[in-house]
Image (spheres, coloured by chain):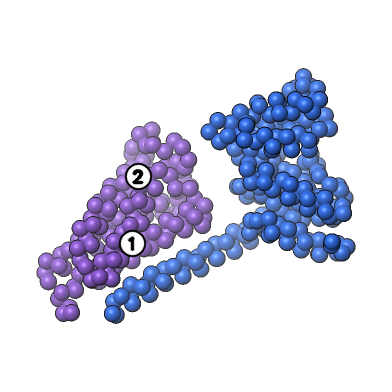
Amino acid sequence: MKPSESGFWPPLFAAWLLSLLATAGALFLGEVMGMTPCVLCWYQRIAMFPLVIVLGQGLLDNDRRCLRYAWPLVAGGASLAAYHCLVFYGFVAEGLVPCGKGASCTDAELQLAGGVPIPLLSLLAFTGIGALLGFTGHRRKQA
Amino acid sequence: MNRKWIVLSTAIAVVLAFVAGVMVFKNRSGQELARSAQDHGEALVRAHAPVYGNPAAKVTIVEFFDPACETCRAFYPIVKSIVDASFGEVRLVLRYAPLHHGSDTAVKILEAARLQGKYWEAVERTLASQHRWASHDNPQPELVWEVLSDLGLDAAKAKTDADSATVTELLRQDVADMQRLKVNRTPGFFVNGTPLTEFGVAQLKSLVERELGKVGGAGRP
């Protein structure tokens, strides 16, 4: 294949890698370190985990149409992560959030060892994937 | 196809890194647990704690125990048989880790029964009726009184004892020790101060065997 036809591949690969790392990180925090995911975390996981499959399949099949299926997940996940950050930093009252049972969405334990809050990491991952996918789409139009 | 290999090898690399991370984390948290048990040896066994088996046994199993915990119920006969089969070389020290709602009330009732010399009978009845009083969405620890009604306890004295300052203080101390020793799930086992990091019946038995070997226990059956 000519390079111009597959110019979308590198940014798509980077987006997929980001989703893979975010998935591995979420599973590590939840299953290995034993930090129970709160309700909002669960919704973000629902958006993040399928991205590994959808983008990965697009990479394997050299199929840029995978973007179409990835966008709703990225948009949903990014919105949830943004909302979660607002809750975490106290701009939105937690009373509005359905997380009375189980882990709290504003718990200080949401802090990583490095001092980066998990909701912020999630937001960075989703916006990063979004930017890379935007780049992927742009490359397509050029090609 | 070259790119397929890039994808697959990347996926494999991330999975391998994950597995390596799991091993490093488990190892480190095990060491941390061992260190905190070493640093706070005095928090493992307190004079007030109930003991099952020979009080002078060379090997001590400390169990952080929650009467509402299903796994504690499942382990109870196992731990008991380890002690019973040890010819007086292993004893069990029970400490409380009331992590469920209502467990603290159940613990106080058990302690009241202990003051009347009916402790282990009370523990067994409480565990056997766990499904009745310790449902997770609707715990009713007051039902434990009913479960113990055939033990012939002096009910009035028991109710006063359950709410006494002594029992409250005992529970407070156990919870403080639980936190100091970083026990966050039950049952939490320590054998002669060594935490059971890899949870399981076989692992507990082999840890006991190892400690027995260290103290030069007589031939095992």
Q: Quadrant of residue B46?
A: top right
Judging by the rendered image, the residue that carries numbered circle 2 is A84
Identity, as a three-letter code, of the amino acid under mark 2 = His
Locate residue B219, reporting x and y percent. Answer: 87, 64
**Residue at the extreme left:** A142
Most foreground residue, B161 or A117:
B161
Most foreground residue, B31 or A75:
A75
Residue B195 visible here: no
Chain B takes which shade in the image? blue
> Where's the N terminus of chain B, which quadrant?
bottom left
Q: Residue at x 45, y 50 (%)?
A: A111
Locate residue A108, reporting x and y percent. Answer: 46, 45
- Badge 1: how crowded within 10 Å, few (<14), some, or many (20+)? many
Residue A63 falls left or right of residue B146: left
Identity, as a three-letter code, of the amino acid under mark 1 = Val
Label 2 lies in what chain?
A
Chain A takes which shade in the image? purple
Residue B1 falls left or right of residue B123: left
Number of the front mark, 1 or 2: 1
Locate residue B13, reporting x and y percent. Answer: 42, 72
Residue B120 visible here: yes
Q: Which mark is residue B182?
A: none
Q: Which mark is residue A52?
A: 1
